[in-house]
Image (tube, rainbow, N blue to C red):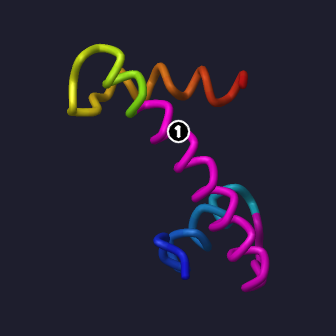
Amino acid sequence: MSELSFAALERIMRKAGAQRVSAAAIEALAQALEEYGLALSTEAAALARHAGRKTVKREDVRLATHHVKSG
């Protein structure tokens, strides 16, 4: 079960230009986004720990985005 709503994912795909979206496509998008989100969150948490913090901040997420994309 996805943490992301079916409707939100369908809206994203429609904004990207899809006229119709199958349930299987939405499930695939949910899985991909959740995998990316987990990797990004893991990296952001590691950056916060490296900075001696328990709180993940916006900058941690921004920096993690660069690491996860290029990694």
> Quadrant of the image for the N terminus?
bottom right
**Quadrant assignment, res 66:** top right
> Regarding mark 1 in the picture, which secondary structure is present there?
helix
**For the point 53% across and 49% down, which residue is it?**
38
> Magenta span has 64?
no
At label 1, the amino acid type is: Leu
Magenta highlight range: 18-44
Front-most of 10 and 29? 29
The reply, left or right, for residue 28 in relation to residue 44 is right
Q: 10 Å neighbourhood of mark 1: few (<14), some, or many (≥20)?
A: many
x and y, in percent, of residue 51 in the image: 29, 14
Q: Main secondary structure of the magenta part?
A: helix
Q: Position of residue 63 (x, y in %)?
A: 47, 19
- Judge left or right: residue 54 versus residue 11: left
Image quadrant containing the C terminus: top right
Residue at 76% across, 67% down:
18
Compared to residue 55, the image places residue 63 above or below, namely: above
Question: Which residue matches tag 1?
Answer: 40
Toward the top, the furthest residue is 51
Q: Is residue 62 left or right of residue 65?
A: left
Residue ID at (69%, 75%) = 26
Image x and y of residue 60, in percent? 38, 24
Please say if 19 is above or below 40. below
Question: What is the total number of numbered labels drawn onto the structure image?
Answer: 1
Q: Residue at x 60, y 22 (%)?
A: 67
